[in-house]
Image: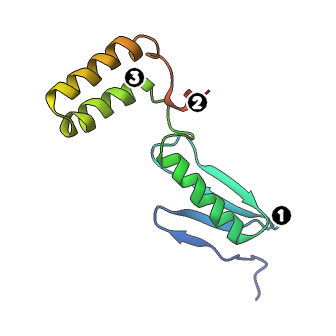
Amino acid sequence: MKSNLQINSCSYDYGEGSVYQRNSDKRWVGKYKDDRLDKPKYVYWKTRAEAKKKLKELKIKCNSGFIGKKKILLDDYLQDWLFNVKYYTLDSGSFNRVESTYLARIKGKFENTALNEVTSR
């Protein structure tokens, strides 16, 4: 007995997302899901190669903090960066200058701004 179920080729590399072809319209779908995302992100293209390329770009944007992350405040991000990254790479005088600049010019103005809302002019 033959089954009417049609299985299209899929690409499942751990942590890379998946690429598959929809039966309804034959478009290729790239799906990326991560614990840091509110919900999975999708890209749609005519060819598998294009979908894989766009999925890779989407993953880079998600991992760099610019797309779809749960709400992270700019203030929280900068404090984490300042005390967990810069603290260990700068000498004490330089760190004190960067910290005082952050406290005087950034902390009060952007306290409730989400990281993904920050853009260049």
Inter-mark Cα distance, 2 to 1:
40 Å
Residue under pointer 3: 75
Quadrant location of the N terminus in the rendered image: bottom right
The earlier-in-sequence mark between 3 and 2 is 3
Which color scheme is applied? rainbow
Above or below, comparing residue 61 to residue 20 in the picture: above
- Where's residue 43, x and y in %? 69, 55
- Where's residue 25, x and y in %? 84, 63
SS at mark 3?
helix
Residue under pointer 1: 24
The earlier-in-sequence mark between 1 and 3 is 1
Q: Is residue 90 left or right of residue 102?
A: left
Above or below, comparing residue 104 to residue 26 in the picture: above
Residue under pointer 2: 120
Going by the numbered disc 3, the residue's amino acid type is Asp
The earlier-in-sequence mark between 2 and 1 is 1
